[in-house]
Amino acid sequence: MTEKNNNQEKVGVYVCHCGTNISKVVDVEEVAKWAGEQPNVEVSRDYKFMCSSLGQELIEQDIKEKGLTRIVCASCSPHMHEKTFRNACERAGLNPFLFEMTNIREHDSWITDDKHAATEKAKSLVRGSIDRVVHHEPLDEIPVEINPNTLVVGGGIAGITSALELADAGYHVYLVEREPSIGGHMAQLDKTFPTLDCSACILTPKMVDVGQHDNITLLTWSEVEKVDGYLGNFTVTVRKKARFVNEEHCTGCGICIEKCPFKEVDEVFEAGMGERKVIYRPFPQAVPKYPVIDKENCVYFKTGKCKACEKFCPTEPNSIDFEQEDEMLMLDVGNIILATGYDLFDAKKIPQYGYGKLDNVFTSLEFERMVNASGPTDGKIVLRDKESKPKSVAIVHCVGSRDENYNKYCSKVCCMYSLKFAHLVHERIPDAEIYDCYIDMRTPGKGYEEFYNRLLEEGTHFIRGKVAEITDAARIPEEEGKLIVQVEDTLIGRQRRVPVDMVILSPAMEARAGSKEVSQLFKMGCDFDGFFVERHPKLDPVATMTDGIYIAGACQGPKDVPESVVQGAAAAARVAGLISRGTVMMEPVRASIDQDACSGCKICNNMCPYNAITFHEDNEVSEVITALCQGCGTCVAACPSGVITGAHFTNEQLFSQIEGILWDVRPEKTIA
Amino acid sequence: MTEQFEPVIVGFLCNWCSYRAADLAGTARIKYAPNLRSIRTMCTGRVDPQFILKALRDGADGVLVAGCHPGECHYVNGNIKATRRFVLLRKVLNQLGVEDERVQLLWASASEGIRLAEKVDEMTEALRALGPLNWEEKVLHRNNGHEAAEAIAVLEEV
C-alpha cells in the first residue's frame, strides 16, 4: 500500500549522531545507508548534530535543491526538537507537518548497550517514520485569540505577585482565594529569613495594592468549581460563598466582630493557637476588610437567636445579611495561573515526636504565630500554659521530610526558618539554651549561609543527627518535668538525651490536600507527591503540559518567599506575552467528520470529553467543533463507519507506521 | 537452542504520560530490553483495536498499550475508554488463542520511566518463554481456518 500509492513522494532521511549520544551505540552510518535503500527515500544522510544550525541547513538545502517533499529526522525525542526541525522545513518552503521525527536516542541508544540490537531497532523505527511520513498531509496551524483577562487561583505571595504584575501591565485579573482574606501563609509569619524583615510589613502593602487595583477583581471566600475551554478561551465557574455580610454596604469598621459574643478556636490563621469570633476577619490587616460569618458555629444559624452583629451594625442599610446565598460566577479568561500553595505536614503522623500528646511540642506554624507581635501571645515565647517562659528549647529539622516513611524530598526552607527560630528565641529569651537538631544544614541562597554563620556565633548548640524520639519519661532527676530529645549526635558518635522545656518541630511542606482533584479540574498533571508538574523542570518551570495553565509558588514544590515571588512574576510574564500577541497558533491535530459519510449513529458524541461534537438534528450527522477539539483521537478510534479523521494521526498514517516498524518481521502474505 | 528468541513488541504510547515515561527512562539511562518499538499517539483513546490486530498480524509477538493513570488522562478520560476497548479485545483474542501476556495495558505517568522499563523487561521475558506468536498459523489456521478468518474480518470492521 505504502509503496504503490506514494511513489511520487521524495523523502529525505537524516540520522543524527548527537555527538556520541546516539552513535556510541547505534551504527548511524549503517542506518543512514540502509535508509537510503528504502522505498520513496531520495536522500539519506548522517550528521554529527542535526539540531545545530549546520544540520538544519542541510535539510533546508536538500529540500530546495533536491525537491524533497517529506522529511524524517532520526534523533532525539520529538518533545525535544520536533519544533526545531519543523521550523527548518518551513524555512525551506515545506509545510512543517510533512516532517516526522524518529526517536533513536531516548527510546534506543540510551536504554541499551547492545549495539546490534540498537541499530536494528533504529532501522525499524526509521522505516516506521518513512512509511508514515509519505501519508502526511500539509496542515495549517489554527489561530486562537487570547482573551486578555486572566484568572489567578490562590492569594498567597505567589498569586499576589502574579496578579499585581499583570494588573500593572494593564491587564484585567480575577484573583480567587478560598479563605476570607488574601495573604496566604506569608501573612502568618513573623519575620522572614535571612533579613528578618517583618513579614506583615512587606506583605500587607502588596495586599492593599491588590485590594485597590482597578484591574483586579478580588474574589475571596470563593472557590473554582468548573473549568471549560482551552488556551485563550476558558470559561471558569467560581462559587462565591455566602459571607452573610453585604460587601457593598460594609465599611469594615469591625463593630460586629467586637460585639459577637461567641468565640471559636482559629485552626486556620492562628494554627490552633488562638481564638477568633464567630463573625471574623482572619487578621486585622485582612484584605478585603469585610468579615465573614462562620455559619457552622453561629448561634443564630443554630438556634435562631442572637443577631448581635446585625443589632450593632452601624451602616445604613444594615450590612449583615443572614439570607445571603452562595453565588455562582462565570468568568471568561484567556489564561489561568495556579498558585494554590502548600500544606504543612501533619506532625501527628510521627507518634514518637509526641506532637498532640506532649503539650510543649509545637509546630513551626504554631511557633510563628506565637512569636508574632499581633499573635495570640502578643509575641511572647511561652509554654502551652501561656505563662512560663522556656529556659531551653530544641528545634527539630526534617519532620516528615527526607524520610522514606513520609516524604523523600527535602522541603528546602526548613533549615533556614529553623535557624530563624533559634535566633528569635535568643533575641526574646537571651539566657535560654537552644539545641538545633539537623541532619544536614542546607542553606543555599543569597545571604543564607551568612545567616547560618551568624547563628553559629550566637551560641546555639547544633547537634547533627536525626531525632529518634521526644518523650517525657525521665530516667534521671534532671530530666523530671522536661521533654527529653533522644538523638544520635553523629559528629561525636554518641546517643544523647537532651532535656528541654520546649520543642519546635519543623514539618515538611506538602502539596495541598486535594491537589489531585485540583489538577484534574484544570486538566493538568500533578506528581506522585501531589505537586503540580511543570512543562520542563529546568527550562519551563512555570508552564504546564496544558496550554494556557501556569503554576507558581509552593504548589509546584517546596519554596521560600523569594522563589515564590520569582515564579509568580515569571508566570505573569508568560501570560502577558500571550496577551500582547493577541493570537497564538495551535497545533492542527484535530478531528473532523466526513459529513457525507457520517451515519449519524452518535457514538462519537459521548466519547468526547470536551463536548466538541454536536449532532445536527436536521440532516442527522455529527460535526466536530474545531475550536473545542483537543485532538485526543478517541472519537476517531470509536467511529464505527471510520469516517472521522484525526489530523496528523490518521488511520492511514498509523497503519503505515505499524507496517514500517515491523518491516523485518512481516509475513510475506501481508506485504502488499 | 543457542540463540535466544527476541520477541518484537509494538508499543502504543500516549504523548503525555507514557511516551514521556519512555523518554525519561532514556534520559535516566535506565537499561531495559530493546525489544519495544514505540508508536506515539496523542492518547490511548486513539488506539483503535485494529491497530493492535494489525501489529499482531504483521509480525509483532506482543503489543503494549501504555497511557496515563486513570484520573490523570490529559484528555480527562481517554484512557478509561481505551480500557473498555482493551478488555473486550483481549477477550476476543483469548478465544483466538492469543495469550494475555502478549497484549498488555500499562499506566505509566511521565515520571515513571522505571515502571515502563520494568514492564518492557517483564513482557520481553514472558514472550521469550511463550515463543513467537505466528499469527498465520496460530490464529488463522489453528481451528477451522475459515471460521477464524471470518472472525477477524468481523473484528476489523469494528
Image (cartoon, coloured by chain):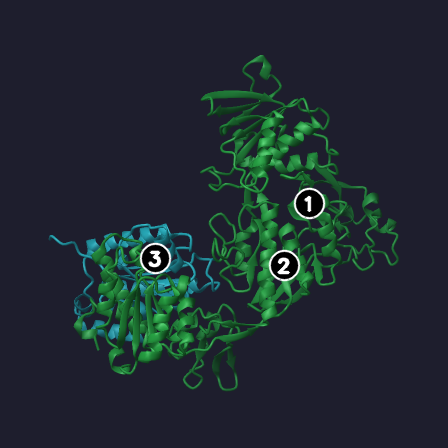
Chain colours: A green, B cyan
The residue beneath circle 2 is A152
User: Judging from the image, what secondary structure is the residue with disc 1 in?
Assistant: helix
* Circle 3/circle 2 CB separation < 8 Å: no
The residue beneath circle 1 is A187
Q: Between residues A420 and A501, which one lies in front from this camera angle?
A: A420
Q: How crowded is mark 1: few (under 14 residues within 10 Å), some or many (20 or more)?
A: many
Marks 3/2: CA–CA distance: 36 Å
Residue at mark 3 shares a chain with residue at mark 1: yes
| Residue shown at the point (58%, 58%) measured from the top left | A571
| Residue shown at the point (16%, 54%) measured from the top left | B4
The residue beneath circle 3 is A106
- Mark 3 or mark 2: whose residue is earlier in sequence: 3
Q: Tell me the subunit letter for badge 3.
A: A
Q: Tell me the subunit letter for badge 1.
A: A
* Circle 3/circle 1 CB separation < 8 Å: no
User: Judging from the image, what secondary structure is the residue with disc 3 in?
Assistant: helix
The location of residue A215, given as percent across then percent down, is 71, 63
Point out the residue furthest to the left here.
Answer: B1
- Mark 3 or mark 1: whose residue is earlier in sequence: 3
| Badge 1 amino acid | Ala
Q: Report the label total.
A: 3
